[in-house]
Amino acid sequence: MEQWLVWLIIVILLTLIEVATVNLTTIWFVVSGIIALIISLFVDNYILQFGIFVILGVILLITTKPFLTKFLKQYKVKTNIDRIIGMTGVVTEKIEKNKDGEVKVDGKMWTAYADKPIKKDELVKVLEIKGVKIKVEKEGK
């Protein structure tokens, strides 16, 4: 089998894995596989091609993944639930140290917990969402 054909199959398989996972897991090796495919057209040494494939893939992974991951996170669209983070709510059922309470935020009732006890009718700020519960703190902290 021709070496360029082997690289083409590898590139196609890695592309399919990337499309299936959408986690930026193999994209760098797709690029290095394309480079190895091009090199295979001119150089008949499979060890050299494989070395370039691995080394270039690792270099691309190390140098570009942090930047690309950060860039993609900037464009994360908030869902309807995410938008309540940072909003102010009112405690409708007191929150104690090891006991959940209830908070009304954006017209909806949420089971809530906090690091410190919070009395009924106090204003709170939503810090995060974990499952169906929200973590809050007293407003103005």
Image: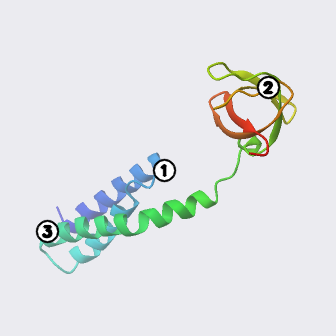
Q: Is residue 107 left or right of residue 135?
A: right
Nearer-N-terminus badge (3/1): 1
Query: For the residue carrying disc 3, how many other residues have a C-alpha within 10 Å: few (<14), some (14-19), or many (20+)?
Result: some
Q: CA distance from mark 3 to mark 1?
A: 30 Å
**Counting residues from the N terminus, which is met first, the one under dot 3 or under dot 2?**
3
Residue at x 36% of width, y 64% of height: 61
Provide the secondary structure element on which disc 1 rests.
Answer: loop
Q: Secondary structure at mark 2?
A: loop
Residue 129 x/y as whole percent: 66, 36
* Quadrant into which the C terminus falls: top right
Of the two numbered discs 2 and 1 in the rendering, the one whose residue sits closer to the viewer = 2
Reading the image, the residue beneath label 1 is 22
The residue to which callout 2 is attached is: 119
Residue 34, given in percent of the width and then of the height, sits at: 33, 69
The image's colour scheme reads rainbow
Amino acid type at image mark 1: Val
